[in-house]
Amino acid sequence: MISNLSDKSPMFYARLAAVLYLVMVPLGFVGIIYVPSTLIVDGDPVKTVANIIESESMFRIGILAALLIPVVNTALVFTLYRILRPANKLLAQAMVVLILLAVPIAMFNEINNAHVLQLVSGADYLDVFDTEQINAQVMSALDLHESGIFIASLFWGLWLLPMGYAIVISGYIPKVLGYLLLIGGIGYVLDAFIYFLVPDANFEMSTYTFIGELLLPLWLLIKGVNVERWIEADKSSS
C-alpha cells in the first residue's frame, strides 16, 4: 500500500491536500469560531454557564470539531510534504515539524473544555462548591482554552513560513500563493504576540491575512500543480 501511494501522480496529492485543507474550514469555523461565539458571553459567567447547559450537545460538537482539526492537519502536512519536497526538502521537513508541534497543544487544550463539561454536570462531588464558584471555574477553564488556541496559533503561523517559501521557489505552484501564505503565517504569529502582550487589544491580524489558506486549496483542487516542472524538480532533488 505504501509503495502504491508513493507512485501516485503529484496531481493526486494536490487534490488530496486540497480536500483535506478545505475539510478544516468547517471544522475550524464550528470548533473555534461558531460554538464559542454563540455560547460564551464575555463578562457574564451566569449566562455563559446557562448557555452551555442548555446547548451541551453543541458544546460537545465544538470539542469534537476542534479535536478533528489537528488530526486532519497531520494528514494534510504529510500530503503537502509529498508535493513540496522536490522544491526544497529542508523547508518541507521544517513545515512538518512545526505543524506536528501544534498538534498536541491543540488536542490537549480541549481538556479545558472537557473540564467545563464536568463543572456543569451537576455531579455530587461538586456540592462543595457554590454556584458562583462553579461559574468562576467555568470561566477560568474557558479563558485557559482561549489561551491554548493562541499558543497553538503560533505554530499554525510558523508552519506556513517554510511552506510559503517552498511554494515561492517551487516553480510548479504560483509564487503569489506562497507570498500570501507567508503573510498569513506572520498574521498568526502576530495574533499570539498581541494576545499575550496586549490582552485588551481584542484584535486578530489573521482575520485579514488568511486568504492564502483559502486560495491554495482552491488552486490545488482546480488547477493542481505543473506536473512537468514538478517531475523536473523531483529528479533534480533526488
Image: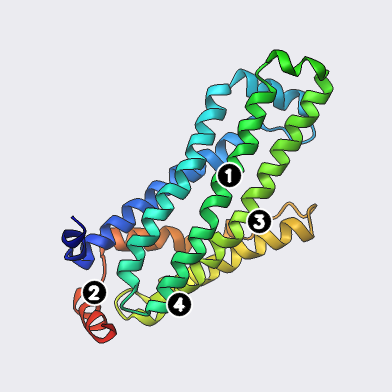
Mark 3 or mark 4, which is nearer the start of the sequence? 4
Q: Secondary structure at mark 1?
A: helix
Query: From where the camera sits, is residue 147 visible?
Result: yes
Say left or right for 145 vs 232.
right
Where is residue 2 drawn, in percent x and y? 21, 59
Q: Residue at x 66, y 64 (%)?
A: 190
Give the Cα distance between marks 1 and 4: 30 Å
Query: Is the residue 171 above or below the residue 190 in the image?
Result: below
Q: Alpha-carbon neighbours of circle 3 within 10 Å: few (<14), some, or many (≥20)? A: some
- Which residue, given by chain and number where applicable, does mark 2 sit on? 226
Q: Alpha-carbon neighbours of circle 2 within 10 Å: few (<14), some, or many (≥20)? A: some
Give the Cα distance between marks 1 and 2: 39 Å
Kind of residue at disc 1: Phe
Mark 4 or mark 2, which is nearer the start of the sequence? 4
Q: Residue at x 43, y 47 (%)?
A: 71
- Which residue, given by chain and number where applicable, does mark 4 sit on? 165
